[in-house]
Image: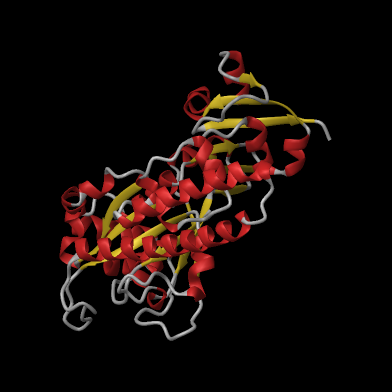
Amino acid sequence: MDLGIIGFRQSGKTTVFNAVTKGRAETGSFGAGVQPNIGVVKVPDRRLDELAKLFNPKKFTLADIRYIDFPGEAFGGGGTGPSQQFLAQLARCDALVHVARAFHDESVPHPEGSVDPARDIAAMELELAFADAAFIERRLERIEAQMRSVKAGERDAAECETALLQRLKAGLEAETPLRAQEISAEEQKLLVNYQFLTDKPLLIVLNVDDDAAAKTGAIEAEYAAYAVKPRTAVAAIAGKIEQELAQMPDDDAAEFRAELGITEPGLDRMIRMSYELTGLISFFTVGPDECRAWNVRRGATAPEAAGKIHTDLERGFIRAEVVRWDELLDAKTMAEAKKRGQVRQEGKTYVVQDGDVMNILFNV
């Protein structure tokens, strides 16, 4: 899963990227043509930590997500949309993380002359909407040209797509992103190959002052109105402090957080919210060789989950032995869980639940 980190210049976007990935990417303005920073992050999961204590496995593997930090120059502002250099890569992201500046630092002047997160959030939405509207306009022009020679049987489909795109464009012009517009399941099929930016899940990250590190909950509540929008969430973190903590040993970082009054690492919350926002859940495979978390889309069937492990398992899927992680933890062994009747035999139509421990049975 790829999450694109976006933001205007001087928002501290790369600082947040370094914090969440424990990276050391150069902060400050990117030069023209610089490629995005990329970092892979393990998703913390207390459930797998506890299961691993039962099996003492040779290998322990958390699920991961990839963050792509786009240069500030990708968004020039003024409602012109992202630059063509980065547009295709942005479109391939599964979700977007918008870092909005909420910190004050005279040595790092805001390009607009003042710190106003609400203004910057609205401005970024405008940039994304412009890109989608421009794409729709080009698509409508192509459909119109094709209509001159389209076969009678294909005309209805083209007219339906035209009507849908025109409606979506009108919504964008009324400042309603696609993720907040009503689109039926049938209409989604028409858009399946499109990668609209305003249709992607959006996590707004408020990059706050150092002295606000212990007040992030109150700041998130202040901006709660954004979080009630479809597939949108808000997190607040002190990026500069979290970047410093990310470079410390875990014990030292935990002690420092306690001194600052930070009850939950902001970055753990950011990773978790990113994971949840994209509709992912985790299932586990456990044993003495490896305890591992796997991510799948909510609603995935057992064979689809098996395919995440290996394509052969999906092709030859017979059934899955399934037990809830907490039931296995309580039983302490798979044999005891089976004795208690907690291990279920599930077939091809079973929908995987978050926290399932699965053993896949298959034909070679």
Horizontal and vertical percent position of residue 79: 32, 70
**Taking 120 as reference, is 43 above or below it?**
above
Q: How is the image coloured?
A: secondary structure
Vertically, is 42 above or below 30?
above
Q: Position of residue 335 (x, y in %)?
A: 63, 21
Q: What residue do we see at 63% from left, 47% from top?
A: 58
219 in relation to 337, above or below:
below
Residue 295 shows in the view = no
In the image, taking residue 340 as reference, residue 175 lies left or right, namely left
Between 246 and 320, the residue placed more toward the observer is: 320
Q: Residue 156 lies in what quarter of the image?
A: top right
Q: Residue at x 43, y 66 (%)?
A: 22
Give the total number of marks visible in the rendering: 0
Residue 293 seen in the current view: yes
Front-most of residues 267 and 108: 108
Instruction: Return the residue nearer the eye: 275 or 70.
Output: 70
Q: Is residue 285 left or right of residue 210?
A: right
Q: Position of residue 209 (x, y in %)?
A: 19, 67
The C terminus - image quarter: top right
Q: Position of residue 65 (x, y in %)?
A: 51, 55
Q: Examine the image and state in which quarter residue 289 appears.
A: top right
Q: Is residue 50 above or below residue 210?
A: above
Q: Residue at x 18, y 48 (%)?
A: 221
Most distant residue in the right direction = 364
Residue found 67% across the figure and 22% down from its top: 347
